[in-house]
Amino acid sequence: MNALTPEIEQAVRAAIREKGPIPGIAALRALTGMGLKDAKEWVDNSGEYYRKPVGRCRYCGDETRSPEAQQCRHCLRDWHDDANVLRLGTDKPWTESR
């Protein structure tokens, strides 16, 4: 395995900024011979990786897939219509029993 020289680190960080974390992981592995798990951990903890912004469910507080999401895969609420919050995947109001 090659050492993580300043030049390699700079190249990997550029790949992360320009193309995202997966190409950054691939670059890190190609340039150093680092294993997948270690390369992923390095990219995840480097502080300069791209992460798609997420939102929060207004009901349970868990992450939604985007800041604009109007449904939650965790608590199964769908609030596309604020006056009629539904159970995700049904046409039943949330207040009805499951």
Image (cartoon, helix red, strand yellow):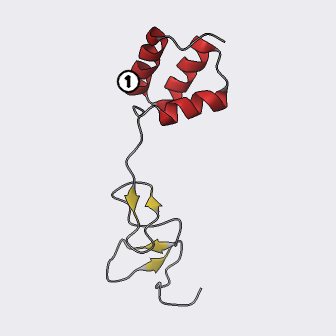
Q: Residue at 58% across / 11% down in the picture?
A: 3
Which residue does the image show at 65% across and 15% down from the upper left? 33
Snapshot quadrant of residue 28 = top right
Task: Identify whether 84 is placed above or below 74.
Answer: below
Q: Quadrant of the C terminus?
A: bottom right
Q: Above or below — where is 69 with respect to 89?
A: above
Label 1 crowd bin: few (<14), some (14–19), many (20+), radius 10 Å: few
SS state under label 1: helix
How many marks overall?
A: 1
Q: Dividing the image into 4 quarters, which one contains the N terminus?
A: top right
Give the image quarter of residue 39.
Answer: top right
Q: Nearer the viewer, residue 97 or 89?
A: 97
Residue visible at 37% across and 82% down in the picture: 84
Along the line of sight, which residue is nearer the eye, 77 or 21?
Answer: 21
Which one is in front, 56 or 76? 56
Of the residues shown, which amino acid type is indicated by label 1? Glu
89 shown above or below 29 = below
Q: Position of residue 82 (x, y in %)?
A: 32, 78
- Using the image as rendered, state which of residue 82 and residue 64 is in the foreground: 64
Residue 46 rendering spot, x and y as whole percentages: 46, 31
Q: Which residue is mark 1?
A: 18
Place of residue 23 in the rendered image (x, y in percent of width and height, measured from the top left): 51, 24
